[in-house]
Image: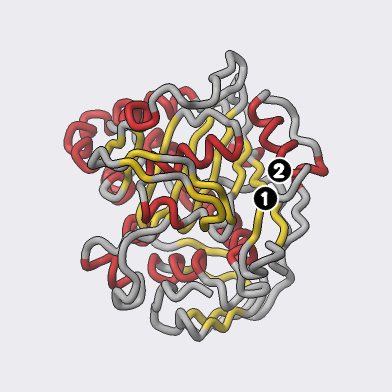
Amino acid sequence: MSNDETTPGPRASRRAAKPRKRRRGLKITLGVLLVLLLATGGTLYWLYSQLDGNIKGVDINKALGEDRPEKLPTSGQNLLVLGSDSRAGAENKELGGGGSVSGARSDTAMVVHIPEGRSKAVAVSIPRDTLVTRPECVKDDGSTVAGKERVMFNSVYAQVGPACVVKTVEKMSGVRVDHYLEINFAGFKDLVDAIGGVTVDVPQDIDDKASGLHLTAGPQKLDGTESLAYVRTRHGIGDGSDLGRIGLQQQFLMALLSEVKSQDLLGSPTNSYKIAKSATKSLTTDSGLASLTSLAEFARSMNGVDPASMETIMLPVAYDKIDPNRVIASEPQSGRLWKAIREDTTIPEDAKKSPATGG
């Protein structure tokens, strides 16, 4: 069980319980959301130069060299989106429960595939507890880290850095990653607060003593700290594993997008600037997207993508036979899933089914 849960103050619900509303194929990833947020601020182009300095860039191509999957001419665009729980800085330490956990981990990871033509998109969530083979990687200081088998996916970020996470994903999937987007937890909190909170339909009562999150099933409006606890809770949902909360993350991010769309950002330059500032100050991208101009251009190229048609799939995994607290990619499902993404073809229904569900 992870000991890095957020510790917001308890929140007692005043709402009556309602049945869970199922949402299939109506989900969005945080990384794509950030890009879309920047696109909605197109009328504030004159402010871009003031916000450019907020975005940190990572030269993924230089770090990985030529040992990468081939980029197929009709394979669309692939983004690796990470939500990191960095403990750097006082604000992130406070969100992490008093700073008891050092370093940083990739708490949320999604491969977002935007097919050729960009009329729809799919996101594959990689559970953080998945055991993977980490390839040999080069750290920022130029030193080489040997490859290793059976390491937790979310540990790669902490041990070697974002470029190695990209390389690990490419090795396990055979999918060429075109762009990298990362937001830390403090930025996530500030983004939610900047839009005035997000209303989610809590699927079941949550009583997570580890994080202090207490919610009753039904519609709840969450502020930034509560939202962060909601997407990170493990003890309050399912079997207590990472798998159970992936559904909450997907559901919350859809609600977040709906909230943004419901606000008149174009009619409110002040709100647009405040949201863009919150989104960018904790944003790290690959060097090709490390400016508001580049992000806006990429967002405009995605104008044909309907967020309501986006589908999020959890990578099919099975419980590890040696350590039941960990999971491994399940075959042949995961292989079929990655093959469909590589070739930009329809994902077979059986490739979306996971033996381990976290229920």
Q: Who is closer to the viewer here, 81 or 160?
A: 160
Q: Who is closer to the viewer here, 147 or 326?
A: 147
Total marks drawn? 2
Going 63% across and 31% down the picture, which residue do you hit?
Answer: 120
The residue positioned farthest toward the right in the image shown:
350
Going 28% across and 41% down the picture, which residue do you hit?
Answer: 143
Q: Position of residue 150 (x, y in %)?
A: 56, 55
Query: Which disc, if any, is residue 189?
Result: none
Q: Position of residue 348 (x, y in %)?
A: 80, 36
Instruction: Judge left or right: residue 308 versus residue 189.
Output: right
Question: How packed is label 1: few (under 14 Cα within 10 Å), some, or many (20 or more)?
Answer: many
* Residue behind mark 2: 334
Task: Give the answer, above or below, for where 315 lies relative to 138.
Answer: below
The residue positioned farthest toward the front in the image shown:
146
Q: Who is closer to the viewer here, 288 or 320?
A: 320
First along the sequence among labels 1 and 2: 1
Q: Circles 1 and 2: CB distance less than 8 Å?
A: yes
Going 37% across and 54% down the picture, which residue do you hit?
Answer: 159
* Residue behind mark 1: 329
Distance from disc 1 to disc 2, alpha carbons, whole Å, reads 6 Å
